[in-house]
Image (cartoon, helix red, strand yellow):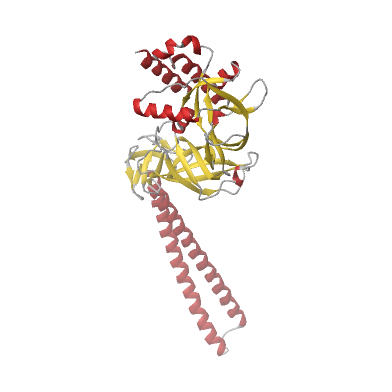
């Protein structure tokens, strides 16, 4: 509200300077109207006010992922550039693999040794098993002693244990071979998804480490906007609600989407959580990392008289919050609108009575408010209230404005307002 009040004050003084400069009739009657301020007014309406929550968000590409090497090695070849489209599985970067090939060769050699030892253990076990069978036949004929049977049984158990050990060593060697094959495969860094490459941070010859991101991939045709929600906001904001997304870098562009996901966990200390909004970005308007403004539409207020926020004024003398109402301006406003439509003139009214009326704000939106205390159809001053307060606020010359003009004015930056005032002054002086 402070920023809006400053903007309105700037514009009011600008309008006071230029509103009558090029008007011959105003020059002729300047003596009569010197003490009557010129203001702008709009007609109050009746209806419901859209309820919305304005937040700041950050855009990312859909399924955006940072790529980190899984092994450390020098970069040997690079196959992609920033902005290049890739498919899932495409090779992006090749790391030097000499060391990993040697490790694989050693693991394979160790596997062959263990396999040979397992075959030896199997043969030894087979020989002991044969001896055991012969001893059992002799034992059935009482041709061997119990001691001999115990010895051969011990040899059999030892041979079985040696074979199990050899087989376990083979399995361990096979696992080592698979591990080295996987490590060798990691020298080829592949795209985990289909998308566009960006933020490439790799050059041939540099050392790639597991803790350093080397590039990012994301689907730019779809975007995700993330916003923060406080505990209080979560009472109003729900998944599925419509949102509007815009940015200063995208003039005259409003993207639409809906709240897709809300994390139910509040952050420790911050007492806030995040909501995600999926947005169709086929025109590539949203760039990953872009800051955007998000309006979440979560309902409508009760029906009431609706006025622009710029009409609400706090009287510095009484401390009351209200609006200046042009009490007998309806019929003259209609005639002035017809004149403007026919001749394209932006005129000021004859001096008309104005009155400060205290109001109660029932609901407040981003650009307008629902109020009690005045009726729809009454004309309320939106620019120049400070001039009325200074001069007693009994009469003014009114320039009628449309709702679209007032809304556009409220959304303008101070530098844009000053430029418009200067342009109006030049045009009227020519």
> Where 286 falls versus 352 (above or below)?
below
Nearest the eye: 267 or 157: 267
Quarter occupied by the C terminus: top left
- Image quadrant holding the N terminus, namely top right
Tell me where residue 306 appears, x and y as whole percent: 54, 37
Locate residue 268, reporting x and y percent: 64, 42
x, y (%) of residue 16? 48, 16
The residue positioned 42% from the left and 49% from the top of the image is 183
Count of numbered circles on the image: 0
Q: Looking at the image, which residue is at 40% across and 18% down?
A: 424
Q: Residue furthest right?
A: 318
Q: Nearer the viewer, residue 290 or 136?
A: 290
**In the displayed structure image, the side of residue 11 where residue 271 appears, left or right:** right
Visible in this render: residue 65? Answer: no
Q: Residue at x 43, y 28 (%)?
A: 335
The residue positioned 47% from the left and 32% from the top of the image is 407
Whether 162 is drawn above or below 29: the answer is below
């Amino acid at each position: 509200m402070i920023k809006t009040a400053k903007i309105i004050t700037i514009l009011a003084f600008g309008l006071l300077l230029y509103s009558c400069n090029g008007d011959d009739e105003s020059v002729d009657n300047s003596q009569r109207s010197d003490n009557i301020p010129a203001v702008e007014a709009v007609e109050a309406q009746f209806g419901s006010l859209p309820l919305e929550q304005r937040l700041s968000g950050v855009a990312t590409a859909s399924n955006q992922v940072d790529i980190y090497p899984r092994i450390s090695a020098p970069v040997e070849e690079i196959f992609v550039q920033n902005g290049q489209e890739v498919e899932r599985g495409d090779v992006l970067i090749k790391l030097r693999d000499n060391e990993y090939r040697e490790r694989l060769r050693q693991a394979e050699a160790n596997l062959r040794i263990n396999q040979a030892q397992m075959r030896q253990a199997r043969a030894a076990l087979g020989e002991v098993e044969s001896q055991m069978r012969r001893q059992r036949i002799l034992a059935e004929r009482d041709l061997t002693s119990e001691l001999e049977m115990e010895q051969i049984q011990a040899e059999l158990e030892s041979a079985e244990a040696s074979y199990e050990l050899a087989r376990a060593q083979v399995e361990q060697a096979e696992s080592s071979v698979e591990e080295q094959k996987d490590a060798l495969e990691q020298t080829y860094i592949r795209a985990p998804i289909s998308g566009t490459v960006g933020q490439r941070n790799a050059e041939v010859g540099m050392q790639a480490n597991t803790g350093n991101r080397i590039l990012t991939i994301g689907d730019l045709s779809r975007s995700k906007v993330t916003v923060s929600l406080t505990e209080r906001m979560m009472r109003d904001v729900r998944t599925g609600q419509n949102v509007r997304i815009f940015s200063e870098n995208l003039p005259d562009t409003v993207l639409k989407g809906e709240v897709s996901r809300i994390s139910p966990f509040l952050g420790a200390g911050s007492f806030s959580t995040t909501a995600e909004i999926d947005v169709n970005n086929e025109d590539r308007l949203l760039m990953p990392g872009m800051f955007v403004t998000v309006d979440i539409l979560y309902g409508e207020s009760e029906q009431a008289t609706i006025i622009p926020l710029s009409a609400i004024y706090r009287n510095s003398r009484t401390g009351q919050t209200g609006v200046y109402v042009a009490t007998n301006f309806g019929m003259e406003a209609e005639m002035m609108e017809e004149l403007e439509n026919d001749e394209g003139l932006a005129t000021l009214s004859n001096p008309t009575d104005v009155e400060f009326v205290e109001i109660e704000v029932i609901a407040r939106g981003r650009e307008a408010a629902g109020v009690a205390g005045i009726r729809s159809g009454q004309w309320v001053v939106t620019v120049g209230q400070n001039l009325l307060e200074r001069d007693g606020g009994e009469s003014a010359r009114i320039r009628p404005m449309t709702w679209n003009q007032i809304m556009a004015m409220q959304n303008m930056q101070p530098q844009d307002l000053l430029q418009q005032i200067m342009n109006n002054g030049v045009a009227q002086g020519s």
